[in-house]
Image (cartoon, grey):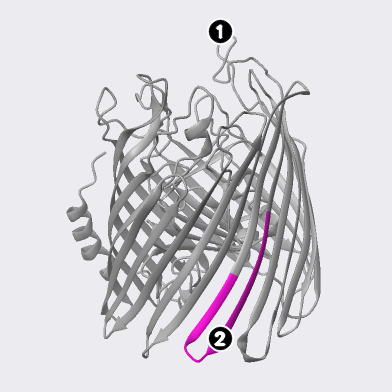
């Protein structure tokens, strides 16, 4: 599929401003986001493409995992290796799964060996909100932010003290519970939470007729999952506007899967962060932050210990935000990161650090908005790497804005790519990218809409090179894409939808030139519809994804699919609600990674106690 960007831009400009919907309603207020610029701005003010998922969205959708939340969102493709608790990859705007920077409460997370975050273990019951910023953001965050940035915020609290709990059960002998308390009053906030999830699962990896599947083994059994998580967040706002915030999240997960060398893992994900912000004088905001994240995994084969991979990341940050004039803001900061590896696998190098210095300016002049950012990262292994971005917005009319942006980004090789036995290559260079984007967004009495087209070129992609029997900077990619979103209210129904069209082309020399990059769906559509009916609330989610390929040679084709989920909730009393969801209504049989099956038709029922404010 070839996407012609000029033609798409013309079609957007012609179609969207003239759109009408039968019933009008007042559009919702724009969400305040901090991830796009590292400062608090509304989603309408920032020039980046942003998606926000709130706690209300999570509860309305009855989502049981981060994958449930992300599927079908603009610019996002999710790959999963066999159900709950199995390896989950998130591709943003067609970039690699390790080209996504992930933060939890401002702390950078992810495995230093694998190079990706463990989305499969993130407890959705403990999440307050998610901010997804699409497009390069290395000029603010450094390495990894090629496809975009995802920041997850845990429950925060505030106001009067309130407890809550929920308990649920469903198909595949699945059970789930959560309990917590939050409060703090007007100046303080606190939240303490626990969650537990357990499921017997299903056979995650199918077996071929010959008796061996893609996991190089035949284990036709149920592959279960058990997750115990806890979080604490607390803070206080002092006189003069100074703030202190503390956050902690820990997840312990046991996961069964199919494999010839290992088939069971015990993992721990933990983040710890502190932040202090103050205003030494008018128009100057100083923020100091420190964080630590851990990604630990012990792996077993039939109860016998097989391997251990523990990684730790420590971060420090100093950021100064200066108000300039009536509408300008200049952010200047320094980030320090230290990665460490401890493993039964012998890595010749087990530690590295990185220091980044950045400056980011946001300004406004009449109908024009603009952002300019530069950053220089000094990596202990790769030396200096510079990135930047430039964005411009223009208010065509009240409620209609055009945007254009250009940015560069990079991704430092992971420890596995550098040093893993019989694969790593210490001579690897960072992957680099440049991206250009054009967009239109509108707010009207009938709702909100947005449309973006983009082109991203990635150089020095890291892949296995059979000529040297190791990883190498051999690949190039060119990605064209189109994203559109719409949210409105029609005949008492809250409606939202998103469409993504991708042309992720392999531009490397050799037999794979011109092929589609693996595991990216070329077309993705998501539709959500919800309605309140007194004590009842009903809704549905439809996700449709086109074909994808599982390999660089494009020989292993994964068919497209459509899933339909139904949900309903009933208010038993003011603070009590029972909810039920029927997922994959038509029992679609599909895979997002070859051989790895996805859940069929299933039901889940939840009872929740949540005092209403």
Q: Which residue is mark 2?
A: 279
Residue lying at the far top of the rendered structure:
210
Q: Quadrant of the C terminus?
A: bottom right
Question: Measured from the top left, where is residue 313 in percent x and y?
Answer: 61, 51
Magenta part of the chain: 271-288
Question: Magenta includes 274?
Answer: yes
Label placed on residue 69: none
Question: Measured from the top left, where is residue 48 in percent x and y?
Answer: 38, 65
- Look at 37% across and 21% down and name the residue there: 555
Relative side of 276 to 411, left or right: right
Label 1 packing within 10 angstroms: few (<14), some (14-19), many (20+):
few
Task: Give the mark nearer the N terminus: 1 vs 2.
Answer: 1
Viewer-proximal residue among 238 and 69: 238
Question: Measured from the top left, where is residue 111 in percent x and y?
Answer: 58, 43
- Look at 45% across and 40% down and name the residue there: 413
Question: Magenta includes 470?
Answer: no
**Separation of residues labelled 1 and 2 (CA atoms):** 68 Å
Viewer-proximal residue among 44 and 20: 44
Residue 398 visible in the shown view: no
Front tag of 1 and 2: 2
- Contact, mark 1 vs mark 2 (Cβ under 8 Å): no
- Look at 75% across and 20% down and name the residue there: 302
Q: Which residue is mark 1?
A: 210
Residue 314 in which image quadrant: bottom right
Residue 349 in which image quadrant: top right
Residue 25 visible in the shown view: yes
Residue 448 in which image quadrant: bottom left
Element type where label 2 sits in the image: strand
Label 2 packing within 10 angstroms: few (<14), some (14-19), many (20+):
some
Relative side of 423 to 158, left or right: left
Element type where label 1 sits in the image: loop
């Amino acid at each position: 599929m070839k996407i012609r960007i000029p033609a798409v831009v013309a079609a957007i400009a012609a179609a969207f401003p003239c759109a009408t919907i039968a019933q009008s309603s007042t559009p919702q207020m724009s969400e305040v986001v901090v991830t796009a610029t590292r400062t608090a701005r509304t989603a309408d003010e920032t020039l980046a493409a942003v998606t926000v998922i709130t706690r209300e969205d999570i509860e309305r959708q009855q989502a049981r995992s981060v994958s449930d939340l992300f599927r079908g969102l603009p610019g996002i493709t999710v790959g999963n290796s066999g159900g709950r608790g199995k390896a989950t990859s998130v591709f943003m705007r067609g970039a690699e799964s390790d080209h996504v920077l992930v933060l939890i409460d401002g702390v950078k997370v992810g495995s230093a060996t694998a190079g990706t975050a463990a989305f499969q273990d993130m407890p959705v019951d403990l999440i307050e909100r998610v901010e997804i910023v699409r497009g390069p953001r290395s000029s603010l965050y450094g390495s990894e932010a090629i496809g975009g940035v995802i920041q997850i915020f845990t429950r925060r609290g505030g106001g009067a003290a309130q407890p809550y709990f929920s308990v649920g059960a469903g198909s595949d002998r699945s059970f789930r519970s959560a309990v917590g308390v939050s409060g703090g009053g007007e100046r303080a906030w606190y939240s303490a939470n626990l969650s537990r999830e357990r499921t017997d699962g299903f056979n995650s990896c199918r077996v071929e007729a010959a008796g061996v599947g893609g996991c190089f083994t035949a284990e036709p059994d149920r592959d279960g999952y058990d997750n115990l998580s806890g979080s604490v967040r607390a803070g206080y706002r002092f006189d003069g506007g100074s703030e202190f915030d503390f956050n902690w999240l820990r997840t312990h997960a046991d996961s069964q899967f199919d494999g010839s060398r290992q088939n069971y893992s015990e993992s721990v994900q933990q983040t710890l962060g502190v932040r202090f912000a103050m205003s030494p004088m008018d128009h100057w905001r100083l923020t100091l932050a420190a964080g630590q994240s851990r990604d630990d995994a012990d792996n077993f084969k039939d109860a016998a210990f097989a391997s251990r991979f523990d990684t730790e990341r420590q971060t420090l940050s100093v950021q100064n935000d200066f108000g300039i004039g009536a509408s300008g803001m200049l952010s200047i900061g320094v980030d320090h990161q230290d990665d460490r590896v401890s493993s039964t696998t012998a890595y010749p190098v087990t530690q590295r650090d990185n220091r980044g210095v950045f400056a980011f300016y946001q300004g406004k002049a009449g109908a024009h908005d603009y952002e300019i950012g530069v950053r220089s990262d000094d990596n202990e292994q790769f030396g200096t790497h510079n990135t930047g971005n430039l964005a411009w917005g223009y208010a065509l009319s009240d409620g209609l804005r055009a945007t254009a942006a250009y940015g560069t980004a990079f991704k430092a090789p992971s420890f596995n790519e550098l040093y893993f036995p019989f694969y790593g290559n210490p001579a690897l260079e960072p992957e680099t990218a440049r991206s250009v984007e054009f967009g239109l967004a509108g707010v009207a009495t009938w709702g909100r809409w947005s449309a973006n087209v983009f082109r991203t070129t990635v150089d020095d992609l890291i892949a296995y090179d059979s000529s040297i029997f190791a990883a190498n900077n051999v690949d190039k990619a060119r990605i064209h894409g189109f994203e559109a979103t719409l949210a409105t209210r029609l005949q008492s129904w809250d409606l939202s939808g998103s469409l993504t069209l991708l042309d992720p082309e392999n531009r490397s020399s050799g037999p794979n030139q011109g092929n589609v990059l693996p595991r990216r769906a070329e077309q993705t559509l998501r539709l959500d519809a919800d309605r309140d009916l007194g004590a009842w609330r009903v809704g549905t989610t439809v996700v449709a994804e086109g074909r994808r390929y599982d390999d660089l040679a494009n020989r292993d084709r994964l068919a497209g699919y459509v899933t339909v989920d139904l949900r309903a909730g009933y208010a038993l009393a003011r603070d009590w609600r029972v909810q039920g969801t029927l997922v994959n209504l038509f029992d679609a049989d599909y895979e997002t990674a070859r051989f790895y099956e996805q859940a069929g038709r299933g039901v889940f029922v939840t009872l929740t106690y949540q005092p209403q404010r």
